[in-house]
Amino acid sequence: MMDKIATKIIAKYLEKGNMSRCLRDILPLSNLTLEQRDNVAEIVHDVVRWKKLYDNIIRERGINKIPETYVQLAIVKAHMGAKDIPFDYKYSCSEYLAKILKKREALAKYLNERPPTTLCVNLNKSSPVEVIDLLRKEKLPAEQSQLETAVLTTSNGRYSSAIKNRYAHVQDESSQLISHLAVNLGDSILDFCAGNGGKSLTIASITKNKKTLHSYDINPKKRETIKQRGLEYNANLVVEEEPPKKKFDVIIVDAPCTGVGAARRNPEAKYVEGPGNFPQIQLDILKDAAKTVNKEGIILYSVCTITPEETKDVVENFTKQNQFKIIGLNNNSYSKLLMKNKYGAFTNVPGGDLFFISILQK
């Protein structure tokens, strides 16, 4: 049964792409248990994660290139026997990404690992101890991670009572780290590319609603989601309906990007052939954010990627064109979770996604 469901999902993926949507469209209607769903999801992830390598195996063996073949290759973990092949096949990524990763092979291995599921504890309604206790009572593994708000569990943890009661939300620990850094930079904070509000919820949790917190996203549906989540999580935040004209001490610009740093959860990101229009989009957003920064205020720029065009190049271009300077991340209590460079830092959170962070002061 699980093989058939996995094959159905892969058939749709091969036709239309977008692994996450294919999973959402089929898995909830599969009548499988949570554990079975998790197993199917992992098979699907492995097919997408190793697709370029599997394509090479299929060519070399002269076997049928059909959904069932991909699923069987994933089940027998055919990728584990790959040796003496080009780097982009060995780590199943685009030639563009292979050029970036060749000097950092440990990252190539890391981006093909299965990530943990991390919860962000809502300190306005619960505590790490209580969330861990709830998960363990539900026979789910749980342990405190590096950050006060971070609890590690398995993918089934997203269905726990801790989530249903809004005692926590699912959020990668590196993403949580950005909020932890932001709250130490000023008293008024604008989450400028807020998405569905994950970082805003984390800031409200960390500060226990003791900071002035505003959120904005260009997508009106996401703004409505943030409003609803704010109410459910007891998060004291103001959702702006248009880019605010008022000024803030700290602007978080968690910009749209290629998402390479989250490739363990979304392996499609490993096949990007270049940065596309993202660097210009990121630069434009930073310029807009600069209009709402107080004198000597801070922009915290973050992207979940490792490409030079979206990280150091964007920061270099922005600081050249605007009156901002890069502030070092020295003397920071989170230094051990950061790999610093002259433009900022990459996150170094065990089990976390790979983010680039730069602190820019007006």
Image (spheres, grey):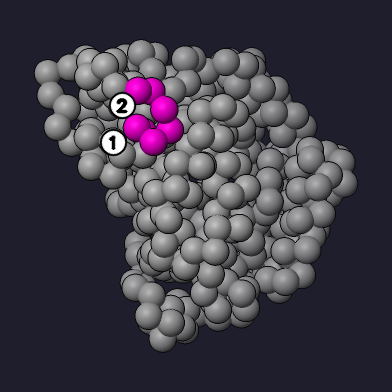
Q: Position of residue 137 (x, y in %)?
A: 41, 86
The answer, for residue 197, to whether it is visible in the render is yes
Q: From the viewer's side, name the closer residue of 63 and 88.
A: 63
Q: Position of residue 222 (x, y in %)?
A: 76, 48
Q: Is residue 161 left or right of residue 232?
A: left
Above or below — where is 234 with respect to 358? Answer: below
Instruction: Please say whether residue 69 is one of the residues in the magenta stretch.
Output: yes
- Other residues around mark 1 within 10 Å, as few (<14) / some (14–19) / many (≥20): some
Magenta residues, start to end: 64-70
Disc 1 marks which amino acid?
Leu
Instruction: Report the Cα–Cα distance between label 2 and label 1.
Output: 7 Å
- Residue in the image at 41% along x and 27% along y: 66
Disc 2 marks which amino acid?
Tyr
Instruction: Please say whether residue 146 is one of the residues in the magenta stretch.
Output: no
Give yes or no for contact between labels 2 and 1 (Cβ–Cβ under 8 Å): yes
- Residue in the image at 22% along x and 28% along y: 105
Mark 2 or mark 1: whose residue is earlier in sequence = 2
Tell me the tag on residue 54: 2
- Other residues around mark 2 within 10 Å, as few (<14) / some (14–19) / many (≥20): many
- Residue in the image at 33% along x and 48% along y: 114
Return the residue at label 1: 73
Identify the element where label 1 is drawn: helix
Q: Is residue 32 left or right of residue 346?
A: right
The residue furthest left is 84
Quarter containing the C terminus: top right
Q: From the viewer's side, name the closer residue of 183 and 110.
A: 110
Identify the element where label 2 is drawn: helix
Q: Position of residue 107 (x, y in %)?
A: 28, 33
Q: From the viewer's side, name the closer residue of 121 and 359.
A: 121
The answer, for residue 251, to whether it is visible in the render is no
